[in-house]
Amino acid sequence: MNVCVFCSAAEVDKKYARPAAEFGALLAKAGHTLVWGGSDRGLMKIVADAVDENGGKIVGISFELLKHRAREKAAEMIVEKDLSTRKATMLARTDVFVALVGGIGTLDELGEILALKTHEIHHKPIILLDTDHFYEAFKAQLRRMQDERFLHKPLEELMYFADTPQDAMRYIENHVIH
């Protein structure tokens, strides 16, 4: 199965790095392929290193502006012309999405994939790994959107909130059709 991971290319605190590495290791040990932004920096590097170190396959999808930061060692590295094309390729190549902690780019990717699911352009599972309650305010905002009827589907049908890498992997193993 191809698992797309959205996360930061920034250098971050160990409290975020450790779960990213754990998730990457679990992903590889379960025999899944990592599809990710292709960067060799920050959490993107950490999760890809963990997949690689545990014998997994990594597929990077970068774009022209950031190709100089692309990981040299990947089973496959796709360089798209722009961010929109990159996200479309990620959608096409992925069975399930997992968002780790991140910044504006991660929110952009997560927001687009949620919007596409809301409009039934895809039905792929979306998991938010809420390390150290990083996304607590985001989750509260989504709940408010649901409560005030801005979401056309229950939040639970749109995404799953996982507290640990193990919880995220359990969800993948139990809810994603192979």
Image: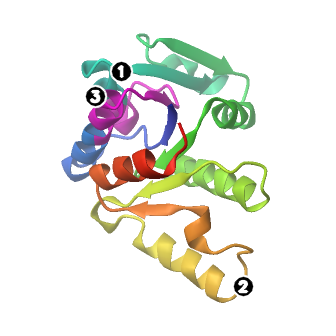
In the image, 41 versus 44, the foreground residue is 44
Q: Write the residue at 59% across / 72% down.
A: 155
Q: Which mark is residue 149?
A: 2
Residue 124 percent location from the top left of the image: 62, 48
For label 1, the residue is 56
Residue 177 percent location from the top left of the image: 55, 42
Check the image and report above or below for 33 versus 11: above
Q: Write the residue at 49% across / 73% down.
A: 139
- Which amino acid type corresponds to the residue marked 2 in the rendered image? Arg
- Give the farthest residue toward the bottom: 148
Mark 2–mark 1 CB contact (< 8 Å): no
Check the image and report above or below for 117 versus 7: below
Does 41 lie within the magenta span? yes
Q: Residues within 10 Å of mark 1 (few under 14, many from 20)?
A: many
Q: Is residue 40 left or right of residue 89?
A: left
Earlier residue among tags 3 and 2:
3
Q: Write the residue at 59% across / 53% down.
A: 110
Q: Is residue 71 left or right of residue 80?
A: left
Task: Assign a secondary structure to mark 1.
Answer: loop
- Which amino acid type corresponds to the residue marked 1 in the rendered image? Gly
Specify the segment rendered in magenta.
Answer: 23-47
Mark 3–mark 2 CB contact (< 8 Å): no
Residue 30 percent location from the top left of the image: 34, 32
Q: Residues within 10 Å of mark 3 (few under 14, many from 20)?
A: many
Earlier residue among tags 2 and 1:
1
Does 40 lie within the magenta span? yes
For label 3, the residue is 50
**Residue 44 lies in quadrant:** top left
- Which amino acid type corresponds to the residue marked 3 in the rendered image? Ala
Q: CA distance from mark 2 to mark 1?
A: 41 Å
Closer to the eye: label 1 or 3? 1
Task: Assign a secondary structure to mark 3.
Answer: helix
